[in-house]
Image: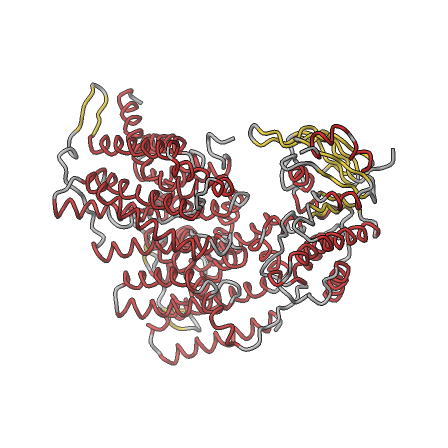
């Protein structure tokens, strides 16, 4: 399947999802669906660096928050439509990804991971001390009720996140089948051998951190409008960091399908669990699933299913 | 800047640093010597705090005594975790991804379990010395800082003696450099690493007790320490206890000055900023080559 | 003096207090087959790593094909035409044998300035040709874990060759192989050399070194102590004392 055929197929599925939600005529489904789709984007973005290159980012929440706070900043400084904000958020968090990568990617992988943990706290401290975007008190972002042509604002936000999810999946899948994806895999396998084979590992890792960071930021951009009131603790919340890791790990990290499955499964599970049980219990569940899967099923759900999938699909050749 | 303020900020920083050394020493052993990136360590420290809290609240046991009583339990916990880690990750090959996710999951599970058990309220302990302060002319020495600092230094000294003077201790140090030499010493590397990791987690019991003497604790406090401990570890150079102490003192003093002169809300960024800067410019540590 | 392919001048490297390389000079002409020997810890691997850009040398310089290599990292040197095989084979375990070879084709050959990009068909053809050359024909879809020790060495050499190098540095390509397997690999290296590739062979197995090398270089404690015709070098009193006498 060529990438645009894939994009078309994804869009068709997305349109079906959207109209199904419209048909249910209940805003709750849009609210819940938005969160699940947001996790699809986050998990897919995390996997571009984590799954393809083998570098663990613990700071997904930081990139997400950079996106969200870009929106808060422009909401006050220069009101722009959400698609423009998504783009700006992508640029801001992409640059942060590039910077973090540039500082730490020459070192052993563990140092990069530790640095991403640190990054989250540094950025959170900066935001807490930055009064323009609300400081520790948080900021209100008033959203309009209606959007022309689409209907309620929640539907509009849902549609944007749906588009982002389709975009993220298309990007991930395109990478997998390209020269870039092969280069990423050599980094995951053996960096020394990769360099000896002519792979510019530092450059590739920087591309991955930038892309991954940018996508996470884009996922965060509509969030202030969704939640209406953004405070540092919710934007930098641990659930984002944990889910961004747990979803690909549980789904499977070697292809775009894994994060998608993981996000749909865990995301939906959490939506249901938050309503029926407490949110702390459902986070505990995510933690237990994460630990359980990395020990028992290191290849995730995709790895568990693959043997029964019938013949193993042949990998596409790169251009 | 008055001399009084300066001296007190310096002393407060060193007391804080002494405590940071206790929190970090476990990571120094796990990350620096065993090459296990145990980011869950701060979670175990908080667990230690809650154990000290329970023993103190229920039986009126002194938190430091409680920490000592918890040592064997934490040692066994550490040994068990290493056993799982070894069989699930280390044995399978050098892939770091899943091992990191494993410890991240443990950190998360510890935190959420504590929230479910105790809620998000701050907990504190009672001991006679907590509210006292020793005043030496200019300098004020609050005992709630001084006591943890002194016990922490004692713990570090004992560990250093153990690592340099005993057979098992030397074997632990050798694990980092040369697995072959270790085999020639007729020591089983897996057993040695299990012991070392057990010790590393056991230090969290003490560090947790110190923490709850110094400040009230709630489950998510641990996260603040992740950046700190790794900053100290990297600053001091990996795998050296004296280096750990120096790094801890340095961070304590820098944080204390930041809090005194810029306000406490900036303090967390200091450690992480220092960590990022060290990683970027002196990854071998301040004392490294 | 004719143009040398590789000119190493006063190369020095230390690890803390330990001097791994102490002013090594070495020049190699195009098309030569050079053996590099020395006891364990004599600095052979450090030399290879400094030549290939995995480690940075502290003093001295390396010129390759008329270019100063200082400041160039490993992949840039690979692209200039310097390939290496690793002492312990380091294939990409998640990729098939064919994809292992495809990496240098994609990232070294296609990235060379002025070179035409290989099409998918050409890439596939080149893979098959390389596998045929090393004797792994038909194993293109296998994974490295399915290969035997000797086949793994062959894959390692094939991958180094895939970057289309001018100089091949084979770092102990035969350790742990049987008598006939060693002969196999030596024959393979000679075949590669006949295609115009300069080869440096770092090896402990004297039989292999002696049958392969046109010139022998001896490294002891980071210093070059001999450099010349193999039969002369091997009789050199200093070499005997420092190396063979052990």
Residue occupying the far bottom of the picture: A23
Residue, far front: C245
Q: Nearer the viewer, residue A202 or C100?
A: C100
Res A278 quadrant in image? bottom left
Q: Is residue A214 above or below residue A18?
A: above
Quadrant for the N terminus of chain B, please.
top left
Front residue (pair A187, B153): B153
Judged left or right of residue C167, residue B65 is left
Farthest right residue in view: C1
Residue A125 location (% of width, % of height): 36, 44
Q: Position of residue B157 (x, y in %)?
A: 32, 31
| Nearer to us in this view, A226 or A44 | A44
Q: Position of residue B270 (x, y in %)?
A: 38, 37
Residue C35, quarter of the rendered image: top right
Q: Position of residue A266 (x, y in %)?
A: 38, 67
Q: Is residue B40 above or below residue C7?
A: below
Task: Note whether C27 is above or below A282 in the view shown.
Answer: above
Looking at the image, residue B265 lies above or below residue C139: above
Q: Is residue B253 left or right of residue C115?
A: left
């Amino acid at each position: 399947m060529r990438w645009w055929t894939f994009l078309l197929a994804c869009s068709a599925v997305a349109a079906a999802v959207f109209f199904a939600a419209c048909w249910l005529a209940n805003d709750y489904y849009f609210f819940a669906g938005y969160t699940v789709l947001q996790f699809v984007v986050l998990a897919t973005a995390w996997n571009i660096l984590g799954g393809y290159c083998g570098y663990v980012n613990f700071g997904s929440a930081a990139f997400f928050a950079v996106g969200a706070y870009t929106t808060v900043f422009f909401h006050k400084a220069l009101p722009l439509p959400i698609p423009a904000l998504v783009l700006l958020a992508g640029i801001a968090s992409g640059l942060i990804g590039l910077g973090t990568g540039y500082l730490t990617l020459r070192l052993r992988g563990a140092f990069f991971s530790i640095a991403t943990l640190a990054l989250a706290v540094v950025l959170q401290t900066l935001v807490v001390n930055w009064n323009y975007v609300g400081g520790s008190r948080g900021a209100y972002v008033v959203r309009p009720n209606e959007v022309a042509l689409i209907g309620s604002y929640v539907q509009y936000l849902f549609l944007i996140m749906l588009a982002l999810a389709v975009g993220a999946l298309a990007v991930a899948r395109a990478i997998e089948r390209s020269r870039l994806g092969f280069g990423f895999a050599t980094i995951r396998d053996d960096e020394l051998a990769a360099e000896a084979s002519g792979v510019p590992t530092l450059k590739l890792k920087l591309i991955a951190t930038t892309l991954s960071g940018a996508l996470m930021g884009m996922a965060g951009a509509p969030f202030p409008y969704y939640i209406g009131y953004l405070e540092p603790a919710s934007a930098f919340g641990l659930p984002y960091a944990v889910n961004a890791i747990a979803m690909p790990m549980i789904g499977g990290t070697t292809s775009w399908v894994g994060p998608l499955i993981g996000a749909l499964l865990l995301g939906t599970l959490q939506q249901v669990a938050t309503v029926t049980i407490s949110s702390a219990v459902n986070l505990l569940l995510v933690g237990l699933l994460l630990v359980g899967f990395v020990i028992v099923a290191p290849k995730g759900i995709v790895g568990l299913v693959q043997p029964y999938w019938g013949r193993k699909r042949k990998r596409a050749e790169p251009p | 800047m008055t001399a009084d303020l300066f001296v007190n900020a310096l002393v407060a920083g060193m007391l804080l640093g002494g405590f940071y050394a206790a929190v970090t020493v476990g990571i120094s052993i796990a990350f620096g010597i065993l090459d296990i990136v145990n980011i869950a360590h701060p979670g175990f420290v908080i667990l230690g705090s809650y154990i000290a809290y329970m023993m103190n609240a229920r039986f009126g046991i002194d938190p430091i005594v409680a920490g000592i009583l918890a040592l064997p339990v934490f040692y066994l916990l550490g040994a068990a975790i290493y056993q799982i880690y070894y069989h699930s990750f280390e044995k399978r090959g050098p892939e770091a991804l899943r091992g990191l996710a494993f410890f991240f999951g443990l950190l998360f599970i510890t935190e959420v379990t504590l929230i479910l058990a105790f809620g998000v309220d701050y907990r504190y302990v009672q001991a006679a010395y907590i509210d006292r302060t020793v005043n030496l002319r200019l300098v004020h020495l609050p005992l709630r800082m001084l006591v943890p600092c002194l016990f922490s230094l004692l713990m570090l000294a004992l560990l250093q003696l153990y690592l340099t003077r005993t057979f098992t201790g030397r074997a632990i140090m050798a694990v980092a450099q040369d697995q072959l030499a270790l085999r020639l010493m007729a020591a089983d590397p897996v057993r040695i690493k299990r012991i070392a990791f057990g010790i590393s987690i056991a230090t969290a019991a003490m560090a947790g007790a110190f923490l709850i003497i110094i400040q009230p604790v709630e489950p998510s406090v641990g996260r603040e320490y992740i950046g700190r401990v790794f900053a100290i570890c990297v600053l001091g150079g990996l795998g050296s206890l004296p280096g750990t102490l120096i790094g801890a003192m340095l961070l304590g003093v820098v944080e204390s000055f930041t809090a005194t002169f810029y306000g406490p809300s900036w303090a967390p960024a200091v450690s992480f900023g220092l960590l990022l800067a060290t990683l970027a410019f002196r990854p071998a540590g301040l004392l490294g080559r | 003096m004719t143009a040398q392919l590789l000119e190493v001048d006063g190369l020095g490297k230390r690890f803390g207090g330990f001097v791994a390389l102490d002013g090594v000079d070495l020049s190699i002409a195009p098309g030569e087959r050079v053996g590099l020997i020395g006891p364990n810890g004599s600095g052979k691997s450090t030399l290879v790593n400094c030549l290939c850009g995995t480690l940075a040398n502290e003093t001295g310089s390396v010129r390759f094909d008329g270019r100063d290599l200082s400041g160039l990292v490993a992949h840039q040197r690979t692209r200039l035409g310097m390939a290496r095989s690793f002492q312990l084979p380091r294939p990409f375990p998640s990729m098939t044998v064919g994809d292992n070879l495809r990496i240098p084709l994609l990232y070294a050959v296609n990235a060379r300035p002025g070179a035409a990009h290989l099409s998918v068909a050409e890439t596939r053809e080149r893979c098959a040709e390389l596998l045929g050359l090393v004797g792994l024909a038909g194993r293109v879809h296998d994974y490295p874990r399915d290969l035997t020790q000797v086949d793994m060495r062959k894959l390692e050499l094939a991958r180094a060759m895939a970057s289309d190098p001018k100089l091949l540095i084979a770092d102990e390509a035969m350790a742990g192989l049987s008598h006939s397997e060693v002969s196999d690999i030596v024959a393979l290296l000679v075949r590669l050399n006949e295609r115009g590739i300069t080869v440096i062979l770092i090896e402990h197995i004297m039989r292999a070194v002696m049958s392969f090398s046109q010139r022998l270089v001896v490294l002891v404690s980071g210093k070059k102590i001999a450099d010349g015709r193999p039969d002369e070098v091997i009789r050199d009193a200093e070499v005997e004392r420092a190396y063979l006498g052990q």
